[in-house]
Structure formats: structure tokens, C-alpha cells
Amino acid sequence: MKNSTFKEPTESVYVLNSVTKIYGKGRLAVKAPGAKWGAEEVDYIATPGSINVITVYITPTLANGLKDIIAELYLPKPLTGLDGGSIVKTSYMEFVPKGQILPLTFKVIVPLNTPEGNYTFRLKIKYTILAPLPEERKWEVEFNLPISGRTYVYTELLTEKLEKGKVQNINFNVVYVGNEPVELNIDFQSDALSILDYEPKAPILTDKPGSFEASAKVYCPPDVQVNGLPITQLHTRPCKLRVRTLKRT
């Protein structure tokens, strides 16, 4: 089994967060299906000391759509916009038909002193409906998004399935998010599988965001009766222990 090499990312983004569903009040000319940290199809993990993007999705509900959308995102303390203020603005002046999902993106600074937790954001929107007569309306909604601590470790399972009665490898990608010196030690455990070998055995030392590959050589007994084969991968660093249980059919 080859040794793993720590890789620095080309961008400080990591796929993890799902879209948070949000619900607004008021006249139903527009609704917001969700919000998330990230842009397009890429999710971010927001951590202290970073510049991030928040995407809020909106969609018209009236048959004739709407246009001239001006949006203001009110940030909780201590977050700020790039100008240091507590309100971030964006706009979209083109016509948006009913049912089309429009992403509104806002750049946000998460200061180093930001505590870990869930934060409440308020979005205010002005827009123009087109029928029966052009009319400007307003709408607002609140939603929550999480901010993680400065150090965060998670695992991506790369192996899709195992075959019974064979020795095979299970491959993982271990991702570190943070800017603090850490020591990551990897260990594998499983009640259903026999762990024959694994890499890396030596601690991974890093102080930058990045990822490295980890793999375990396992034997899958022919008489295993479960559809999902559980394997636990332990990530340890000074004073902390994280456990992720991963399953694949």
C-alpha cells in the first residue's frame, strides 16, 4: 500500500454542507427554496478567518414572473461584508419567469473571533411584478447557517461497494479544514470486516487546509448478512477525537 501525501487544495472550498430550507412570510409572489454556504454546485464550510459566499435561492410564484430584484442580506455579528458593513447587497434586473430558480450570492467575511455555532441571517428583497400592472413589492425571510470551528476534519468515502469473500481495499479522502497546527492519526475498526492493513500509519502533520488519501485492506466474509458494511475511521489530534461511521452497500 502506497504512502499518502498531504495535498493543498487549489481553492479553499470543501463539499459538505447541504442547502438549508427556508420559509418566508408575506405575499406569495416569490419564495426562497433554500440557502447555503457556497456558490453554484460547490459547498463551503465557513470557518473563522475566511472570506465565504452565501447563496440564497429564490423563485417567482406568479404566472407572469418578476424583474428588477434588489436584495439586501443583513449579517449577524461579528460577520461583515467586504466593505466592513453589516449589510451585503446584490441585484438582478432581468426578467425571471415563474418557477425559475435564481441564485443570489453574497460575499461575507467571517472574522477570526467568530464563535462556532448557528447564525441567523435576514434577507430583504424588493422586486417588480408585471401583471395586472407593474408594481413594486417587498419581501423578507430569515434563515440559519452554521459556522464551524477553526479546525474541522471530515472523510469522503471513495469506495462504492465491496464483494463478499474477497480481500479488497476501501479508499477514503481525509480533508482537514483549518489553519492551526494539528496531528492527524488514522485507525480503522470494523465488526463486520477483517482489517488486514491500512495506510497511513505515521501521523499526518499539517497547519494548512488540504487533504490526503487513506485506505484499508479488508477481508469481507462470504456470510456477511448486512447490506451496509460499517467501518469506523478514527481521526485523532491533541485533546480531540472525531469518529465517523461510514456505510456502503
Image (spheres, rainbow, N blue to C red):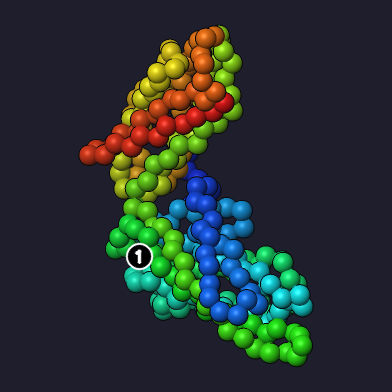
Q: Position of residue 195 (x, y in %)?
A: 42, 15
32 left or right of 80 in image: right
How many residues crowd mark 1 within 10 Å: few (<14), some (14–19), many (20+)? some
Residue assigned mark 1: 111
Q: Position of residue 162 (x, y in %)?
A: 57, 20
Quick one: which residue is furthest to the left in this view?
239
Q: Position of residue 33 (x, y in %)?
A: 59, 63
Rendered view: 76 above or below 196: below
Helix, strand or loop status at disc 1? loop
Given the image, on which type of amino acid does mark 1 rest? Pro
Residue drawn 54% across and 56% down? 19
221 left or right of 190 in image: right
Q: Nearer the viewer, residue 135 or 148?
A: 135
Residue drawn 76% across and 85% down? 131
Q: How many marks?
A: 1
Residue drawn 67% across and 65% down? 101
Look at the image and tell me in which quarter the C terminus lies. Answer: top right
239 left or right of 105 in image: left
Rendered view: 22 above or below 203: below
Q: Is residue 40 visible?
A: yes
Rendered view: 41 above or below 221: below
Residue drawn 51% across and 32% down? 157
Q: Is residue 184 visible?
A: no
- Residue 232 occupies quadrant: top left
